[in-house]
Image (cartoon, rainbow, N blue to C red):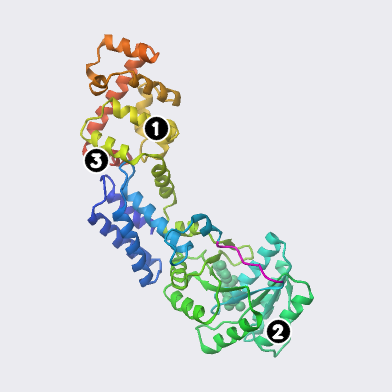
């Protein structure tokens, strides 16, 4: 998805603002890319409509490539959709990030019920979570297998209990899932366990018998958490699975496994959209340490693949005064870059953490930094001094720097407490910048940045 978006957005760069046509083209690509990432069609439609509205409404700042800003809008929308609740349009990002925690607020043993299709990773995830709770929360954990279909499945969980240091409910043959549940609750209470995991059996597809079993178990065990474990690679089927389990069980959260595989996590977006449930954990491997607490930003990044660009746009958006930047870009493109503009730029640069800061932020500004260095260097104290020189000029002088003669230079130098040579250096720098901007032509700052990058 990242590559594809970069391609589209490259064609958007070099323009001051996004036209409807630009946005349409970008949205078509986003739609295609999300479908390829296995996000379900209705979810894709909603998502694109939402992003489109925001993109058209957004005042695109001129100093950054507009395409990157679209990436940011898409990324923010993804984070919100992955982490927020269904109706929550302005999800508080801090709250969103915390959604991963397991709720253990109940009288021990706190019951966690694991549900899902066969092979989705329930048993493996149970072992991982046991280790997680034991290590991080110092909990005493018991695992119980309700998988009466396959004796091997029970032994599999027993081995994981041993590896993770958790207790394991002894296997008694020919008990039903509900009988095992009753026994597990009793044993866990007797043994002083904090948490009891119930690992259920699965079928390859959802059927009535499976659902009836799990529903009966949930009724007896009254789990604090009922987690739907799903394979991130299941793609379009994910929606149907999530809907059926969510209708039948009081689900409290999702765990997406095999996120380490080829899938791009599109299933996560679909399941989240359909159920509105928080995604709590991601399975990132077969081993017991292959577990990640869910992080909406990280998963959005994985789906989008544009992490650096997003950070860049975020920082620039926060720091650059949009209006001033737009006006300056407009004037520059017309070759009207005067000393007032330079003073503004110097002020902006200070805000962005000096020359080094702005050069790091702006795509392809490396060349410009070299030119400025050649014209007398540009440390941060220099920014302040140069601004002081401009402030000592009259408005006429600021607008007509080429007409400043020796007597005026002397007055300006005296007024700002500098040498005439420093006034000369500033004027030379302005001349060079102004020439360069004229050469860059009509693209404005974005065009200039694009040309320098290319
Ligand atoms: P269950 O039938 O739902 O209990 O599924 P299992 O826990 O037995 O897992 C089925 C297979 O998927 C096993 O081979 C696991 O090792 C593997 N598996 C589970 N979670 C992950 C994961 O996050 N990443 C990868 N690569 N494999 C996983
Ligand atoms: Mg299993």
Question: To which residue does mark 2 refer?
Answer: 182
- The span shown in magenta is 99-107
For the point 23% across and 36% down, the residue is: 333
- Quadrant where the C terminus sits is top left
Q: Is residue 381 above or below residue 94?
A: above
Q: Is residue 3 above or below residue 143?
A: above
- Disc number for residue 349: 1
Is 214 situated left or right of 8 in this image?
right
User: Pointers 3 and 2 in contact (CB under 8 A)?
Assistant: no
Q: Which is the main secondary structure of the residues drawn in magenta?
A: loop
Residue 199: give x, y in percent of width and height: 63, 77
Ligand 2 appears in which quadrant?
A: bottom right
Q: Does the magenta-highlighted stretch encompass residue 101?
A: yes
Q: What element carries label 3?
A: helix
Q: Is residue 331 above or below residue 193?
A: above
Q: Does the magenta-highlighted stretch encompass residue 151?
A: no
Tell how many labels: 3
**Mark 2 residue crowding within 10 angstroms, few (<14) / some (14–19) / many (20+):** few
User: Alpha-carbon distance for marks 3 and 1?
Assistant: 21 Å
Q: Which of marks 3 and 1 is nearer the N terminus?
A: 1
Residue 54: give x, y in percent of width and height: 33, 56
Question: To which residue does mark 3 refer?
Answer: 443
**Mark 3 residue crowding within 10 angstroms, few (<14) / some (14–19) / many (20+):** many
Q: Earlier in the sequence, mark 3 or mark 2?
A: 2
User: Alpha-carbon distance for marks 1 and 2?
Assistant: 68 Å
Which is in the foreground here, disc 3 or disc 2? 2
């Amino acid at each position: 998805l990242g590559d594809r978006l970069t391609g589209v957005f490259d064609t958007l760069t070099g323009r001051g603002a996004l036209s409807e046509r630009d946005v349409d083209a970008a949205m078509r690509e986003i739609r295609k890319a999300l479908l390829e990432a296995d996000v379900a069609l209705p979810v894709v439609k909603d998502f694109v409509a939402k992003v489109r509205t925001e993109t058209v409404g957004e005042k695109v700042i001129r100093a950054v490539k507009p395409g990157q800003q679209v990436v940011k809008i898409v990324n923010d929308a993804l984070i919100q959709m992955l982490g927020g609740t269904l109706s929550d349009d302005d999800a508080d990002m801090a709250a969103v990030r915390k959604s991963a925690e397991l709720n253990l607020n109940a009288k021990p043993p706190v019951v966690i019920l694991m549900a899902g299709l066969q092979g989705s990773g329930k048993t493996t995830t149970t072992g991982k979570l046991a280790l997680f709770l034991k290590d991080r929360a110092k909990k005493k954990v018991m695992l119980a297998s309700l998988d009466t279909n396959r004796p091997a499945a029970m032994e599999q969980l027993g081995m994981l209990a041993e590896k993770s240091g958790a207790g394991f409910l002894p296997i008694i043959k020919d008990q039903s899932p509900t009988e095992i549940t009753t026994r597990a609750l009793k044993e866990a209470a007797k043994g002083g366990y904090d948490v009891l995991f119930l690992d259920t059996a699965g079928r390859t597809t959802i059927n009535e018998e499976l659902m009836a079993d799990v529903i009966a178990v949930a009724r007896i065990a009254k789990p604090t958490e009922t987690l739907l474990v799903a394979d991130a690679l299941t793609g379009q089927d994910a929606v149907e699975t999530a809907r059926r389990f969510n209708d039948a069980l009081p689900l409290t959260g999702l765990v997406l496994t095999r996120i380490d595989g080829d899938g791009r996590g599109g299933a996560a977006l679909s399941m989240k959209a359909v159920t509105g449930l928080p995604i709590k954990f991601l399975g990132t491997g077969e081993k017991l340490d292959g577990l990640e607490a869910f992080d909406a930003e990280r998963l959005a990044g994985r789906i989008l693949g544009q992490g650096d660009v997003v950070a860049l746009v975020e920082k620039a958006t926060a720091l650059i005064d949009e209006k001033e930047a737009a006006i300056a870009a407009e004037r520059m493109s017309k070759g009207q870059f005067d000393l007032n503009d330079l003073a503004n730029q110097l002020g902006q640069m200070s805000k962005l953490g000096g020359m080094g800061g702005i050069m790091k932020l702006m795509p392809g500004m490396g060349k410009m930094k070299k030119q400025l260095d050649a014209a007398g260097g540009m440390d941060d104290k220099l920014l302040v001094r140069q601004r002081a020189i401009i402030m000592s000029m009259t408005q006429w002088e600021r607008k007509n720097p080429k007409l400043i003669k020796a007597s005026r230079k002397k007055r300006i130098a005296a007024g700002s407490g500098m040498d005439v040579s420093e006034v000369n250096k500033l004027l030379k720098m302005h001349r060079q910048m102004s020439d360069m901007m004229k050469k860059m032509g009509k693209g404005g700052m974005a065009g200039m940045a694009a040309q320098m990058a290319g």
